[in-house]
Image: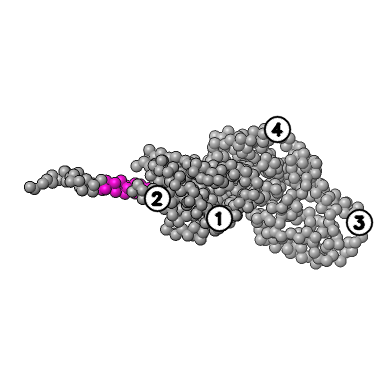
Amino acid sequence: MALKVLFLSSDTGGGHRASAESLAAQFQLLYPGTTYDLLDVQAKDGVPPYNKLVQSYKHLSAHPQQWNFVFNFSNSKAFEFFFDVSQKAMCEKAMRKTIMEYNPDVVVSVHPMMTNVPALCCQKISKETGRYLPIFTVVTDLGSAHCLWFYNGVDKVFIASDQCRHLAKVRGKVPDAKIVQIGLPIRHSFAVQAEALGDRMSDKGVEYQKKVRGELGLEVVDKKTVLVMGGGEGVGSLSNIVNSLYVEFVEQGIDALILVVCGRNEKLKEDLESRDWNGVIMQYHKVKERKVARSLQDFSITSCVSGLSTGTVISAAPSTGCMEGGVTQQIRKMLSNSNLNKENAMSSPELMTPDEAASGMNFDNVPDINRLPTTSESNEDQVEKREEQQQPQSEENDDNIDSRNLQEASEAIYSKKSSTIKTRKGDVTVVGLGFVTKMAEYMVAADILVSKAGPGTIAEAASLSLPVMLTSFLPGQEEGNVDFVVNGGFGAFISDRDPAGIAEEVGQWLTDGAMAAQLSLKAKENGAPNAARDIVEHIGKLSLKWKQINDDRERLDLEAEQLKLGIPSNDEEEGGVSDSS
């Protein structure tokens, strides 16, 4: 039986519309003849500033700190109360009229600012028409969902995670009976590809991956492939990430294909096609030389005498700190510690030299203090670092080592480090993609996804058991998405301000088969490729029941009115009932 569905959504980011369209496609597959409409009821009947959500979102998403303030301010009990009262007083009547004009069988909200008042509208419409109008909420966030998502007046709330279940119960007072945890609705093509792919790491999965790569026209089908998506990130940060990936793979001898989704950014696509990749490698080595020299020049012996480092580092992995022993020994330990190659994920990067700025790269990183733990930083590694730092202090007299000897040590150590770099260079190709319509196929073709923390992208990757490296997020709203990935065990977060750290971790995933298999397995466990279908089945069954009840009620009411007027019912006519007189 067909249904008439009304989706309440807004183009504040692509996720809301994408979720609505994925659900609409399933309605038409499962209930042939179904029709649907998308309505931004705030833009049509809302009051300032809520009727300008799309314009406001475009500005705020480009200014993360402003977004963070607005999100946290509005995600409060005080604002929730004000929004609820003001919207019901100023907008309910107009919104109710608009919804009635569509005459739907069911209303589905996929936006947090279109739940409370529309739910009240549906209740009043049900009373006015005598036909119950069900309304459902489908939450399109994975973790830190806004409080306005959760309103007890709807029929059901569909969520994708335990975090959202907790928020629904605590913030929205939604009972368990109304909460349905399935997953984030994504496009049907991902369900099709997930079924065809099966186990990504199996022989069958590998062969299917090669087949898809060939169908996409990729120049090679047997190279490790990394898919890079910028989302809302600027061209500069995305470009730096691609440069760092290229350098890391070449230097570590990893044969790889880097696919960069540029979308409608033709400038970035053309730049990648014409980029001097040999120049990128040369610039990398120049910057590394300057970095080693500066690290030694800035090293302070006096700061270590007291046993304290001038640069205290707070990190998931222990910092190098002040190491005891001879200065040369200290230098070697500093240079061999991997943390020196990783910038703080949340702090401001150092100013680039003119050469670095010209190349669009910043390899001059500082130690990480807020970076989330990554898979390559095991507890055993951290214990070894602690033991190394606690070696007995040498009794050598280091005060006589002058700056000339430090410089000689710098050159010797850098030469030694350079000689350890793998002699075989990786064969790396970078391909800029325009606007991609076959995203499911490209995610099948990829071995790792590098992206911002958009909930839809994360859900799509998990549905295809694809490990995820997150590089940025909108403060507040998308922080929970990072937790979903990291706690789920199928990825990590390293800020886009640390492109070298991103590249190093991705390179580790590509070269460690056991780690890649574990990440893929965890992604599969957290994926829900058929979430849209399952949600629609729930909504469709309840909506059809209400439609049948409504039709039966109308029929019974009509018969009751006819009986009052002395008009025999159809049952009486068929049974031959007549007046005995």
* Residue type at the position of mark 1: Phe
Please state the horizontal and vertical placement of residue 57, each as a whole percent of the image: 59, 44
Few, some or many residues within 10 Å of mark 1 (<14, 14–19, 20+) = some
Give the SS element for disc 3: loop
CA–CA distance in space, label 3 to label 1: 63 Å
* Pair 1/4: label in front: 1
Q: CA distance from mark 1 to mark 4?
A: 51 Å
Front tag of 3 and 1 = 1
| Residue 357 in view in this figure | yes
Estimate the spatial distance between the alpha carbons at disc 2 and disc 4, rounded to whole Å.
Answer: 61 Å
* Total marks placed: 4
User: Which amino acid is tagged 3?
Assistant: Asp
CA separation in Å, label 3 and label 2? 84 Å
Tell me the quadrant of the picture where the N terminus can be found: top left
- Please name the residue that numbered disc 4 is placed on: 274
Q: Mark 1 sits on what residue?
A: 79
Residues at marks 3 and 2 touching, judged by CB atoms closer than 8 Å:
no
Label at residue 288: none
Residue 402 is marked as 3
* Mark sitting on residue 124: 2
* Of callouts 3 and 4, the N-terminal one: 4
For the residues bearing labels 1 and 4, Cβ distance under 8 angstroms: no
Q: Position of residue 150 (x, y in %)?
A: 49, 54
Tell me the magenta residue range.
541-557
Front residue (pair 240, 13): 13
Which residue sits at x=64%, y=44%? Answer: 62
Q: Residues within 10 Å of mark 4 (few under 14, many from 20)?
A: few
Q: Which mark is in front, 2 or 4?
A: 2
Residue type at numbered disc 4:
Ser
